[in-house]
Amino acid sequence: MPMRAVAIIPARVGSTRFPGKVLAAVDGRPLVVHVWERACEASLISEVVVATDSPEVAEAISARGGRVVMSSGTYETGTDRVASAALGLDADVVVNVQADNGDLNPSTIDAVVAMFRRPEVLAATPVSEFPSDQSVSDLSKVKARVDANGVASVFTRQSISDGYLHIGVYGFRPEVLQRYASWERGRLELAEQLEQLRLLENGVPIHAVVVDDDTVGVDTLTDMNHLLNKLSPGPMDPRF
């Protein structure tokens, strides 16, 4: 029987670094809609759900026939919101697709799901070679170091010479996802403000899949301008 993989996009409006970014217009549509469309195109995903506390996000997705789960509670991270939304869902794999990856390649999501054909994989995430137009010293870009066994041993915002660019997609076995949500945030997660470090701090390996994808999550106004120019080439938007 094939795996049933569900993608959940956690989309809150109150982003710390860039408030309201998931509703920012990109080529005529909110950023979160671009991400939802990309997730819907992934061939190994059975269902796509948007988990949000925002009526505006809910309306943008519902108007296009998408499924929305309203999650108005307080969550430490997007993965904690995903864990709540995943309760009761019929899924062998749950994939957290971060709501700021507006030009994410659907094949990247498929590559993460495919990792779970290996029974030893409990959690998985994609990485790529660092794009030539991005700086490894940019603290808004997350770097990952992957060991010889294909397991991510380091995630950091700091510059590392032998690192990959981390892409904001996380796959989980459902029971691992719920365990994640039960754990307190650890020292490394708090220091780096990187939610995936909670897994490493609790001894759960994160298998990495190297993909050919130059998507860059929108963490700053500069990132938004980069995305606008990429999806709709032309003069730079003066707002960004």
Image (cartoon, rainbow, N blue to C red):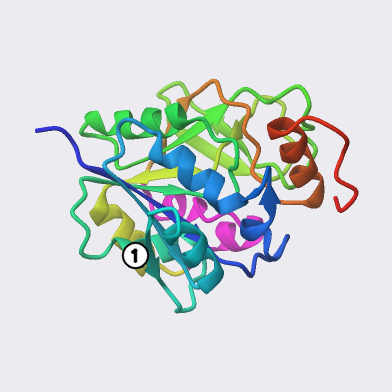
Q: Secondary structure at mark 1?
A: helix
Residue 190, placed above or below residue 240: below
Q: Amino acid at mark 1?
A: Ala
Residue 239 within the magenta-colored segment of the rendering = no
- Above or below: residue 102 compared with residue 60: above
**Image location (x, y in percent) of residue 225:** 79, 42
> Which quadrant of the view contains residue 181?
bottom left
Residue that carries the numbered disc 1 in the rendered image: 85
> Measuring 49% from the left and 73% from the top, which residue is drawn there?
53
**Residue reaching furthest to the bottom:** 73
Give x and y (percent) for residue 187: 57, 62
Q: Does 52 appear above or below 114?
A: below
Q: Is residue 167 above or below residue 194?
A: above
Could you tell whether 182 is left or right of 31 in the image? left
How far across and how far down the image is residue 172, in percent?
Answer: 33, 47
Magenta segment boundaries in residue numbering = 185-204
Decide if residue 54 is in sight here: no
Q: Residue at x 70, y 42 (%)?
A: 141
